[in-house]
Image (cartoon, grey):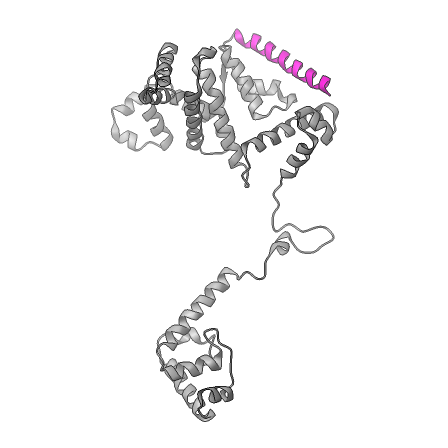
Amino acid sequence: MPAAKNTFAKEKAQLLLALLEQSSKKGYIRSDTILKRFARYRLNEEEKEDIFLEFENAGIQVVFPDNLTDNYLDLSDGDKSDEFQTLADNTESFENLDPVHQYLYEIHSFPVLTHKETLSLVRRIQEGDAAAREKLVNCNLRFAFSVATKYICTGLPLLDLVQQANLGLMTAVDKYNPNRGTRFTTYSVFWIKQAIFTYIEEQSRLIKIPSYISSALKKIKSVTEEYYNTYSKYPSDDEIATLTGFSIARVKHLKTLEYSMSSLDSPVSEEMDGTLLDTVQDDTIIDPITNINIQERKTAIDEILNKLSPRERQVLIMHFGLCGQEKHSLEVISKKMNITMERIRQIESLALNKIRGMNGSNRLRNFIKL
């Protein structure tokens, strides 16, 4: 298994070198060309972005054919677009722009820093200069935006992706150490992508799980797919543990955290009738509509009863079992109130006649026979 894994890695590295050499003559390469050449390796999103970064670090532009992405990237380049200058002269035009273009207009005023200027700001940040930190963040907002636009294919709102990219950028500003010999943009792209990947992962799950669990699950999925592509069968838990470096117990535990979504209208099984909804319904819980009807009935009864005399109200409550009371016969009521049954019948008749003449009495016809 390790030998097969090393073979795959060697093949991918050779293919990458060949593409870098071919595209270096033109200075650019299309993203779909890269994806087609690496299709057999079933790369995940992180691996794709790492390959794109290899080309960018080699000075080779990766061209994304998506029209929306191209348009936004063009607008974020202040040296190549005059649209921002036109907008700057026309406040009314700015107010009529969509939120994305408004954001681009706002960040366009921040200049692109040279490497020397960046290092100067970093030194000031290390000395505790908050203004320098703010300037370094603002001057790299366009770079964070350009990274975020590559993930609009996920279906998530672009401005939400940009917000996450900006959070990653701020993390990079706080952690950057120029003594390691890495340029700030090269370093910050890692934190920007990590913030975006975490956000995408969170939004794709109905049940949120910790990021370290999510990373472990992705690692298991990756090695499982790679193993299947090589041997046309799925690996056992022991083999997954060997490939990932996890213990067998951890692999088993992580696999129990995987879940799938099912419709509540789907059948329980081929042998059983009914749906999944039938198995999770709780008959002790009152249906919302029923609960509303109960509240309306209680309100209507209280309004009517409050318009009666105390004796009339007591007779109706005891006879019809209103206000949470039990129903009683006229004989029981007469004994409790120490009044003859005939008098109880007269009181009830008078009370019902009063109710018939009251406004809103129709609301009680379903509860009391008037």
Residue 93 higher or lower than 63, as above or below:
below
Q: Quadrant of the C terminus?
A: bottom left
In the rendered image, the residue lying farthest to the top is: 25
Task: Tell whether 253 sits left or right of 93.
Answer: right
Task: Tell whether 245 sits left or right of 324.
Answer: right
Task: Looking at the picture, tell me which residue is in the foreground, 111 or 98.
Answer: 111
Q: Position of residue 154 (x, y in %)?
A: 51, 31
Residue 205 in which image quadrant: top right
The answer to if 4 sits in the magenta stretch is: yes
Q: At x 56% / y 10%, what residue is drawn?
A: 20
Residue 303 higher or lower than 173, as above or below:
below
Task: Tell whether 274 sits left or right of 331.
Answer: right
Q: The magenta stretch spans which residues?
A: 1-25
Q: Position of residue 153 (x, y in %)?
A: 51, 29
Q: Position of residue 206 (x, y in %)?
A: 54, 41
In this view of the protein, can residue 234 be seen by the observer?
no
Q: Position of residue 104 (x, y in %)?
A: 36, 25
